[in-house]
Each structure stands twice: as structure tokens, then as C-alpha cells.
Image (spheres, grey):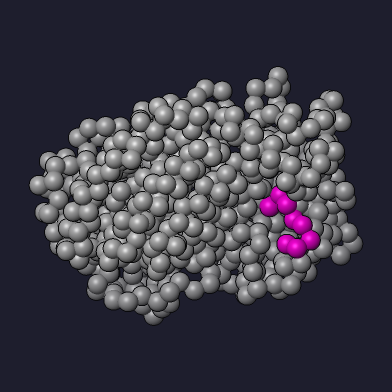
Amino acid sequence: MKLGVCWYPEQWPEHLWASDVQRMAALGLSFVRVGEFAWSRIEPELGRFEWEWLDRAVDLAHAAGLEVVMGTPTATPPKWLVDAHPEILAKGRDGQVRGFGSRRHYCFSSDVYLEQSRRITALMADRYGQHPAVVAWQTDNEYGCHDTVVSMSDAAKAAFRRWLAARYGSVKALNTAWGLAFWSQEYRSFDEVDAPFGTVTESHPAHRLDWQRFSSAMVERFNAAQVEILRAASPGRDIVHNFMGLFTEFDHYAVGRQLDVATWDSYPIGFLGQGPFTVADKARYLRTGHPDLTAFHHSLYRACGQGRWWVIEQQPGPVNWAAWNPAPAKGAVELWGWEAVAQGAERMSWFRWRQAPTGQEAMHAGLNRPDNQPAAAWPEVEALAAGLSQLGPLPPRGRSDVALIFDYDSVWAVRSQPQGRDQDALATAMAWHTAARRLGLSVDIVPPDADLAGYDLVLLPAQVFVDEGLARRLAESGATVLAGPRTGSKTRDFAIPAHLPPDGLKMLIDVTVARVESLPPGIVLPAGNAGQVTGWMEDVESGSQVETRLTLDDGRGLWFASARAHYLAGQVDDGLLRRVLTNVAVATGLQPRDLGPDVRVERLGNFNFLFNYGPVPVTIAHDLLIGQNPVLPAGVAIWRD
Ligand code: GAL
């Protein structure tokens, strides 16, 4: 794994640059990411360019032996552009125009902005596309950050109408698909369809779902335009985008397919406070981040990059943007590095080289303090760099034990009609991922159209859409399937399937969901000593070939099993989920073992990694290549067998 850093020469006096790049190289870094917010410095006014400073910065990096990942600066349209074309601004769900003065203020549906984005991308590609230091391009920066995927500008409304017309063909088909006879919501033409915000009570759920799909398609369109230009002008370079954590507002698989590499921005402590975790877990993992959140995203973005992925921004210390911003535990920065290594990352770079003294992110740590002295993360980066050279070349990440299907469309579907306030398909997927990892199983998160052949076990924690294609691939994979409640609960038109849920999954297990209920917090449905259900429960009718393995105290079946598939009718507690998963995994020939809440293991070829996210030292019985025994809190152990 190559190490690097995000560098903002435009924000610092030029006399610092030469020593910056030399110190980077001495630290063991081999690349920088530059440029992604520098539009106003590159083009201070329309058509007036100042490239020379960036030329010098790139040349300096090159001379120091550093590779360059160049960002297109389109996340920050400058003031002159906004003033000349105020119509490029996005409009929030509240109808307010999102103004200049931070970043990401543009609307993905604006053709005017798309043209500007093409223009600046082409100019940058022309200037740096053949530069020997430039090894990759990052398109824009964090599509959707600060809630910017959805816009209800006039441009977005017009584009939505065109998108609907292409999808449904006729307005009659739209009326039928959405079921608009309900409450006299029928339209006479696509031009009458508005954004699904501002209605008296909730807007139509299929309307909201399609708006999300459309918004996602606009992100794809925007990205594709830059990719096309960069491919032509800068052949042989990787094209990447930096995705975010806990973020599902567009289909990352679709954008990922346009790229060579999926990258993401990993802020384990920043995300902890925002994640679906208990108050106790947020305290326990305050300074390490949750044991599975980072790995979940590593696995997800590995899928988005079709195997190729990087961490392009890594937390080096306290961030500025969470509600509270604690400092990492001693060792955590190094641990996060090894976690990425174990998951097969090709590169990792820290955000940022030096903490800025001014601006929105002045409180955000870097590898250097604002006075240019090494910050707390520095020795941990040194240690990671030394460890990596000690291990030498590492084998590629092979196929994991378990495939977990994660689907953006299903996340949006649950959000469009949750039927219970706290229902969230991302949180469900993360809970299942945690259950598997805590049992020592490795997990590949995969899209619903993935090739499933070769997996022994496939998990469907919250796969709302199970069409024939997915059902057939599940059946033909030979894998055992474990599916959770809500599986196959809607058609793509967002109707309840004609033969009721779980729709296509019935091909593998003969169950029918006759009724569902959601439950408020604090209500528990016990299943004897085995565990309990909270939040969601279904009444399931099962065929004669289906065994009921577990029943609620109230008599309703909870765990149904056929030869090849298992269906859970309720949202079970973590312990029960692990019990079911253990049972199913053992039956498929895997060897699950409970590692407890804090310890996680991964394998890369014959290298074994153990991570201690908890507060207690862990003793292990191996001769270590890296780390010490016992493994301290926030410590890592690596051994080979
Ligand atoms: C990311 C973003 C960076 C910086 C960083 C701070 O979301 O891409 O530009 O803002 O967060 O943690």
C-alpha cells in the first residue's frame, strides 16, 4: 500500500513547498493529492489563468519523487462563476437557494454548470494530462457532501420530467406504475410533475423513490462527463472519485463502474458519533472508531471499484465537522492504516499535510501542526511506513467467506416508506456485517447484480427488491442464503408484489409474508431464552417443506429454513443474529467463532491481522511479525502462517 497526503500548496506561502515535499518523501510518503479546491487560484476570472504556481508545485513534488493525484476543482465553483450564472446554484428541499460561501453549492442538474465543469476539466487535463508525475485524477470531491445530491432547482425539475418520460414512456404508464388513482393524484402530462417536497402530508413514496433515483442519475451524468474528458486527454492514468462514509444518496456502484478505482474518505472517529451505534458503543470506541464501520466501507468500496480501492483521505487527529471531535487513541492512526492494508487497499493518504490556521477547517488536525511541527499522528505514519517496508510486497485480497448484498435502491425504498420511524437499511446491513465479522468471518459487500458464484454463504439483510434475475443467481450460486425481514417486499415500481413478499426469494424458500408490524423503541417480543425481536415483525405463512426453527413466545414463527435458504421474520437482537449466523455458517462448512465485541481479524494471503478496538489488552498465541503481545488497546498484531 502506497502512502500519501492531501496537500494544499495554494493555501501556504511558496517558500514552504520545497521543504514540504522533501519532508513528505522522508516520512515514507510517495504521492500527494492536489488541486481539488483550487479553482479560484487557477482561474481568478473567466478566461484568465494562473497555472504557473500549480506547475511549480507539481514539478516540486515530481522532483522529490512523489506521484501526483490531481483533483478537478469542480466542488468549489468560484464567486465570479456564481455571479455570472446564479442558475447553477442548487435549491434545498426547503426551497432555499444554496448560496456561495462554503462549497458544493452547484446543482447536478444544471446544464450550464455541467458545461463549466467540462471546460475546467478539459483545461486541467490538457495542462497536466501528460505530466510524468500525474498518476491519477480525482473527479470533483465527495459528491453529495453536505446533503447536496438532492436539489429542487428549476433545472432539476425539468430534468426530472425528462427522466420520467424516458423511464415510463407515457404519463398513463406513470399514473399506473405509481398508483396515482389514490387520492386523485393523476397527472395529464410529465410537465405537471413537481419535486416531491412541500406537500401537505407525506408525498407519494414512489415519487420520492424515483426522485432519489433521478438525483443519483444526475450524479452519474456529472461524473461521466469528466471521466470522458480525462480518459481521452490523460491516457494510462487511473480515474478515481472520493466517496464518503455512511452516505447512500446516490448509487455508488454506478459511479464506481465509470472509474478505475473507488476511493473513500475515512474518518473513523468523526463517523462514530453519526453512526447507528448505542450510546455505550460510542463511549467505548470514542478514540478508535467502531470496530466494523471502517471495514464495512472498505469492503463496500472494494466492490464499487471492482476490486481496486484506496483510502484517499484518512483521519490524522481530531476533525472539525462532527458534533464533538475527540482525539484518536495512541496507536489508532496506525491501526487504521493496517486495517486498510488487510482489506487490500492500494493507497492511503492522510487529510491533510498541515493544519490550516484559518477557514472552516482550522480546527482539523493534519500530519503537521499549524506551526509546521509534526503533529501527534506523525510517528504513527512513520511506524506504518516502516512496517510496510518490513513486510514487503503483500498478496492481493482474495474472495471473502461471506457475500453481503447491499443495494442503494433498497436503502432509498426503506427510506421512502419506512413504516416504522427507525427503519434504516444501511443500519441493518451494518449490524449484519458486524455479526459476521465478530464471528471471525470475512465479508465481501456486493451489489445485487454481482456474480455470486463461489460464495458459500450470501446474506440479504435488507434487500427490498428480489427480482427473478437475483433469485436465479442466488439459486444458481449454490450458496446458502440468509435473508432478513423486508426481503422482496416491493417491486421496482414500488408496489407490494402480486404474490406478496418475499417475491423472488420464494424460489428458494416457500414463505409468504401475510402481515407486517413495526414497533416503537422499548417494545420487545421475546423468543424464549434465544433472544428477542424489536422494531419489526412479520406474520409468515410457510409451506410444508419449510422448517420453523424458532418461534416467538406469542407463537409466531421467527426463523424459517429450507434446504438452501433461511428467512428471519423479525429484527432480531445482536446475540440472536450471531446465533442464527453461526448455525447457518457452520452448516455451510465455515468456522465461525465469537471474538467478542472489540477484537477483529482479517486475512490477506497467509498474513493474519488482529485489531484490538477495545480498552483491554488481548493475549494471543502467535509469533508476531508486527506488534506486541499482549496486543494493547488500539493495537495491531500481524503474523504469518
Ligand atoms: C472531507 C472532505 C475534505 C475535508 C475533510 C475534513 O469530507 O473531502 O475536503 O473537508 O472532509 O475532514
Q: Is residue 461 left or right of residue 95?
A: right
Q: Is residue 433 part of the magenta span, yes or no?
A: no
Location of residue 238 in the rendering, given as x and y in whole percent from the top left corner: 41, 64
Residue 531 lies left or right of residue 631; in this view the side is right
Instruction: Please report the residue visible at 61 percent of the width from the left and 49 percent of the height from the top.
Output: 408
Do we see residue 265 in this rendering? no
Q: Nearer the viewer, residue 86 or 399?
A: 86
Residue that lies at the very extreme toward the right in this rendered image: 544
Residue depicted at 20% across the width and 48% down the height: 53
Q: Which residues are the magenta region?
A: 463-470
The x and y percentages for residue 605 are 43, 77
Q: Which residue corresponds to the image point at 85% horizontal and 38% vertical from the top-left? A: 172
Coordinates of residue 589 in the picture (x, y in percent)? 62, 75
Q: Nearer the viewer, residue 281 or 360?
A: 360
Q: How many marks?
A: 0
Quadrant including the N terminus: bottom left
In the rendered view, does 21 fall on the left or right side of 194?
A: left
Q: In this view, which residue lies farthest toward the front?
A: 47
Q: Quadrant of residue 100?
A: top left
Q: Please say if 84 is above or below 370.
A: above
Main SS of residues in magenta? loop
Identify the residue at horizontal 82%, vertical 30% (top origin): 188
